Amino acid sequence: ENNTSTENTDGMPAHSFEVLVHDGFSPSVANADIAAVILANLGPGVRTHGNTEVDILDSEGITHRIRFSRPTQKNVYVDIFARRVSGSTPPVDATTLLRDHMTAEANKLVSPGADVVALALRAIVYNSITTKGYTWLYDVQNLELGLSASPAGTANLEIADREIARFQIANVTATLL
């Protein structure tokens, strides 16, 4: 919300507000439906702001341009290096199991503007010992993450207010040591 008389540092015009809508990585709600809800709740003299524009008719047939934003998706790349329990025989698809579990659980942690916390990702993998029964898994030796392929970093990833982290199976690898 910008309730001042000048544009703010986020680029929002005076007396405006921005609705940030995340209804999944493949949006399921039509832009016109979102715009209709915004229009129905719009106060007089208030402008909307955002990266999506929809022209919509009100009950009197007057066209209003409604703006809102959907967060920009930031693909996260993760390389997991895990140690197995000495002498154990992991299943043939152990690395696939780790990759798939990590991807699914990491996507449950995301929301617009939420940073990617490296320790939380490590915990997902490590906790799979109990949550998934991966008794062959001993420890997470290393976990590298980044916003481009072949990540080498181990620090948290900053995600801006209008962005959302996205984990995809194709961008996550697991190696058992």
Image (cartoon, rainbow, N blue to C red):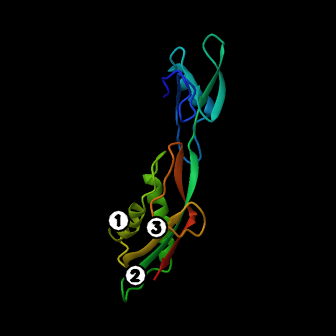
Give the answer, above or below, for where 40 lies relative to 21.
Answer: above
Q: CA distance from mark 2 to mark 1?
A: 16 Å
* Dot placed on the residue nearer the N-terminal end, 3 or 1: 1
Q: Position of residue 123 (x, y in %)?
A: 37, 65
- In this rendering, position of residue 31 left or right of residue 106: right
- Are dots 2 and 1 in contact, CB under 8 Å? no
How crowded pointer 1 is (Cα within 10 Å; few <14, some 14-19, many 20+) is rated as few
Provide the residue designation for mark 1. 131
Provide the residue designation for mark 3. 154
Provide the residue designation for mark 2. 84
User: How many numbered discs, if any?
Assistant: 3
What secondary structure is found at the residue carrying circle 3? loop
Q: Position of residue 76 (x, y in %)?
A: 54, 59
- In this rendering, position of residue 56 left or right of residue 142: right
What secondary structure is found at the residue carrying circle 1? helix
Give the answer, above or below, for where 112 lies relative to 142.
Answer: above
Q: CA distance from mark 2 to mark 3?
A: 21 Å
- In this rendering, position of residue 89 left or right of residue 27: left
How crowded pointer 2 is (Cα within 10 Å; few <14, some 14-19, many 20+) is rated as many
Which residue is more in the foreground, 154 or 172? Answer: 154
- Are dots 2 and 3 in contact, CB under 8 Å? no
Q: CA distance from mark 3 to mark 1?
A: 24 Å
Which residue is more in the foreground, 154 or 169? Answer: 154
Indicate which label's residue lies in the foreground, 2 or 1: 2
* Dot placed on the residue nearer the N-terminal end, 2 or 3: 2
